[in-house]
Image (cartoon, helix red, strand yellow):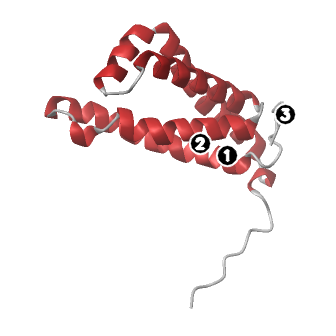
Amino acid sequence: MLPELQMPAQTALEGPLAGELLLVARLLIGGVLAFMGLNHFLDAENMTGYAAAKGLPAPRAAVLLSGGTLLFGGIGVAVGLLSTIAAGALLVFLLVATPTMHDFWAVPEEQRQAEMINFLKNVGLIGAAAALLALSATAWPYALNVRLL
């Protein structure tokens, strides 16, 4: 017989410095992902070539769409604007892009280590995006807290 799971009496955002730590996490995660999105636009030519090499249909459109998703999601998470949509967009992007773009198991040996590093980095970011999505149902301290959902 498995023990019954119970929710803690105190939520994560009620602990000491919880709001400040969440703000730092949001700024770091959102800032990095927004910068990655901006880089899709600044280096669109090279990224389009990489996307084409990975076999994506309409590689330029994919680069621009993913760049916009990262930019919107990263800024939204960082400032707490449309947090559910922003965190959800980042999660969906990472779930699709990680195995598609960083398929370390299917690349030549000389590329395997770099692709594995990027794959594992993205897996960590998937965890962060999932945690932010789970927390998006509550009002975030130090956030704009505008929501549609």
Residue 139: image location, x then y, percent: 83, 44
Q: Pointers 3 and 2 in contact (CB under 8 A)?
A: no
Q: Which mark is residue 133?
A: 1
Q: Pointers 2 and 1 in contact (CB under 8 A)?
A: yes
Res 21 → quadrant: top right
Q: To which residue does mark 2 refer?
A: 129
Residue ID at (61%, 22%)? 71
Residue ID at (21%, 29%)? 111
Residue ID at (51%, 21%)? 36
* Left or right placement of residue 54 versus residue 88 in this view: left
Outermost residue to the left: 109
Label 2, secondary structure: give it.
Answer: helix
Residue 109: image location, x then y, percent: 15, 34
Residue ID at (44%, 35%)? 97
Identified by mark 1, the residue type is Leu
Q: Compare marks 3 and 2 and give the one earlier in the sequence.
A: 2
* Left or right placement of residue 9 versus residue 38 in this view: right
Identified by mark 2, the residue type is Ala
* Left or right placement of residue 6 versus residue 60 in this view: right
If the image is split into quadrants, where does the N terminus sit? Answer: bottom right
Label 1, secondary structure: give it.
Answer: helix
Outermost residue to the bottom: 1
Q: Who is closer to the viewer here, 112 or 60? A: 60
Pointer 2 local density, CA inside 10 Å: few below 14, some 14–19, many at least 20: many
Pointer 1 local density, CA inside 10 Å: few below 14, some 14–19, many at least 20: many
Label 3, secondary structure: give it.
Answer: loop
Q: To which residue does mark 3 refer?
A: 146
Q: Pointers 3 and 1 in contact (CB under 8 A)?
A: no
